[in-house]
Amino acid sequence: MNKLCIWTVANQKGGVGKTTTTVTLGGLLAQRGKRVLLVDTDPQASLSYYFGINSEELNASVYDVFTQASSLTFDSVMNCLCPTKLDSLFILPATMNVATLDRKLGAKNGMGFVLKNALKLIENEFDHVIIDCPPVLGVLMVNALAACQRVIVPVQTEFLALKGLDRMMHTLEIMGKTLSKEFNAVVVPTMFDKRTKAALDAHDKLNEDYGNILWEHTIPIDTRFRDASQAQSPASVTFPKCRGVFAYKRLLKELESKG
């Protein structure tokens, strides 16, 4: 059986397209028949709400994975998952109380590998896992980075977002030393509007600073992503021919070609 493929979508700035990237790539993979798990580690639970999951009504969530880390089993992890409209796409949802995990667990030894260990228990159930991160460095992001083989860093093509990218790359450098791990990272320019000089200038700056890991294409601004979220379904399902989905198909092809 193939090794479980785990990607983490991270940036230390909000509103740059992390959840959209997670949902769209996950949807594309599921439509190909891949068994996909999307993991929500953000206290705001945007990924969970995207699929109509009310975090306040859940019996179990990613919070339970962390608080029950020492006694996790295959069944206890699987019981935390929620189905979606796509048969092969599942969500490990978040709730607001995951915001307390840093205070409760941050100082405990071994808490950086809880998510990795949990995914190991269910690895035969899925082909791909994509983890949506909060924009804050803490126990949740540390777990997401420790668990993955690849880091996808969406960055909005505007200058304020570039500062968040600088912080994220510094975090990867520090985490790489701590974990003795070299991160396989790709920077993905999002919300790109080629009609504006600001977007073009920001993209030039990205290329200048991060050209060695910058994806050569861009994800354009596309209102269909917002419409798809209202339909609680990936844009690849609701608007398969829109330009944003076309761009993510191109990104997925690139990610898969590099292993």
Image (cartoon, helix red, strand yellow):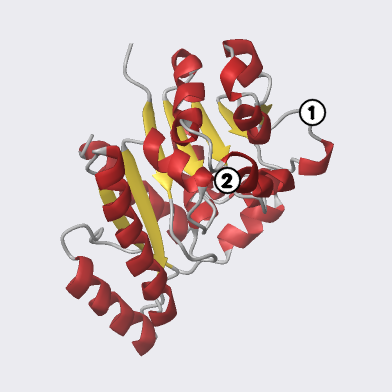
Q: In this view, does 112 lie to the left or right of 38?
A: left
Percent x, y of residue 115: 50, 31
Q: Which amino acid does label 1 sit on?
A: Asn
Residue 63 vs residue 48, the one in the foreground: 63
Distance of mark 2 from mark 1, alpha carbons?
A: 25 Å
Question: Measured from the top left, where is residue 24 in percent x and y?
Answer: 49, 47
Q: Quadrant of the N terminus?
A: top left
Given the image, on which type of amino acid does mark 2 rest? Answer: Pro
Instruction: Report which quarter residue 234 is drawn in.
Output: top right
**To which residue does mark 1 refer?**
59
Residue 191 visible, this orientation: yes
Local crowd size for mark 2, using a 10 Å CA cut-off: few (<14), some (14–19), many (≥20): many
Question: Could you tell whether 18 is left or right of 249 in the image?
Answer: right
Residue 98: name its quadrant.
top right
Which of 70/207 is in front? 70
Please say if 23 is above or below 70.
Answer: below
Can you tell which of label 2 and label 1 is closer to the viewer? Answer: 1
Regarding mark 2 in the picture, which secondary structure is present there? loop
- Counting from the top left corner in percent of width and height, residue 6 is at 39, 33
Q: Mark 2 points at which residue?
A: 234
Please report the residue visible at 44 percent of the width from the left and 31 percent of the height from the top: 113
N-term mark: 2 or 1: 1
Question: Where 120 falls versus 257 (above or below)?
Answer: above
Which image quarter holds the C terminus?
top left
Give the camera-side residue of 131 and 173.
Answer: 173
- Residue, x 18% and y 74% (percent of image)? 208
Q: Can residue 35 be seen in this view?
A: no
Q: Residue 192 got which mark?
A: none
Q: Is mark 1 on a helix, strand or loop?
A: loop
The percent position of residue 82, horizontal first and vertical second, equals 68, 29
Along the line of sight, the residue nearer the viewer: 67 or 193: 67
Which residue sits at x=57%, y=44%? 41
